[in-house]
Amino acid sequence: MAVQSPIRIEFELDDQDIEYFRNRLMEAKARHGSDSEAQIIEAAESLLMRSADGKVPHFLKSRMDQLGTMIAMLKDEDWRLEGDDRAFVVNALVYFAEPHDMIPDDIPGIGFLDDAIMIDLAAGELAPELIAYAEFCDNRDELKDGVADAQPLEAARDILQDRMRRQRRRAVRRGRSGGRSYSLFGSI
């Protein structure tokens, strides 16, 4: 039996494509705006669990890992993401509360493709948050391992969340968010 080499498929989303996904997110916000934060997180966790059954193509796994990080950032009691920062992340997850998304999840091979695209777009928007949270988790691990120069959790959290907010404000002032020339979530 011949071994197949990996196939690389790339596509680029232009401004019109981004607007299409932004509109889908706005529609989801309109339908689920009254949902509690817990319901939105639960829906995102449900997607994560459905995708963990081993039937998800390998190319989607890293996207699902990013979704897991977004959920963890909201549930992490040490991180204590609050106020507008928290709302911004929850808004990134509202699409996953849609029971009928663009591509039904049960279609083998491609069912999670729309979710993966939305996760990628959300990760771009949430870049400052994701980077700060990763650094916080690294610092927490260093504390557990007894690394001498690791910062106390509260100090690390305050420093990293302040930096995260400054980066977000700078991105908004430049008319950009997450290093991209659009804002998927609209006004911050």
Image: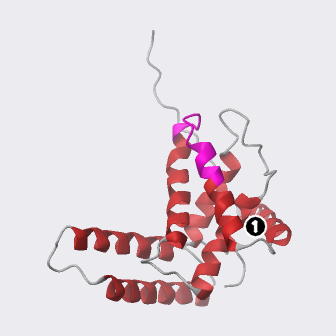
Question: Picture coordinates of residue 95 (x, y %)?
Answer: 73, 62
Q: Quadrant of residue 109?
A: top right
The answer to whether any part of residue 182 appears in the image is no
Question: Picture coordinates of residue 141 (x, y %)?
Answer: 28, 68
Identify the residue at horizontal 44%, vertical 18% (top origin): 3
Identify the residue at horizontal 35%, vertical 73% (top origin): 135
Q: Which residues are magenta?
A: 46-58
Residue sitting at the far left: 148
Q: Quadrant of residue 15?
A: bottom right
Question: Picture coordinates of residue 107 (x, y %)?
Answer: 73, 35
Position above or below: 147 against 174: above
Q: Disc 1 marks which amino acid?
A: Arg
Question: Picture coordinates of residue 40 (x, y %)?
Answer: 69, 66
Q: Residues within 10 Å of mark 1 (few under 14, many from 20)?
A: some
Nearest the viewer among 97 and 104 is 97
Residue 69 among magenta residues: no
Identify the residue at horizontal 61%, vertical 56% (top origin): 45
Secondary structure at badge 1 equals helix
Identify the residue at horizontal 50%, vertical 65% (top origin): 72
**Quarter of the N terminus within the rendering:** top left
Position above or below: 146 against 47: below
Residue sitting at the far top: 1
Nearest the viewer among 125 and 27 is 27
**Quarter of the C terminus within the rendering:** bottom right
Identify residue for label 1.
22
The answer to whether any part of residue 53 appears in the image is yes
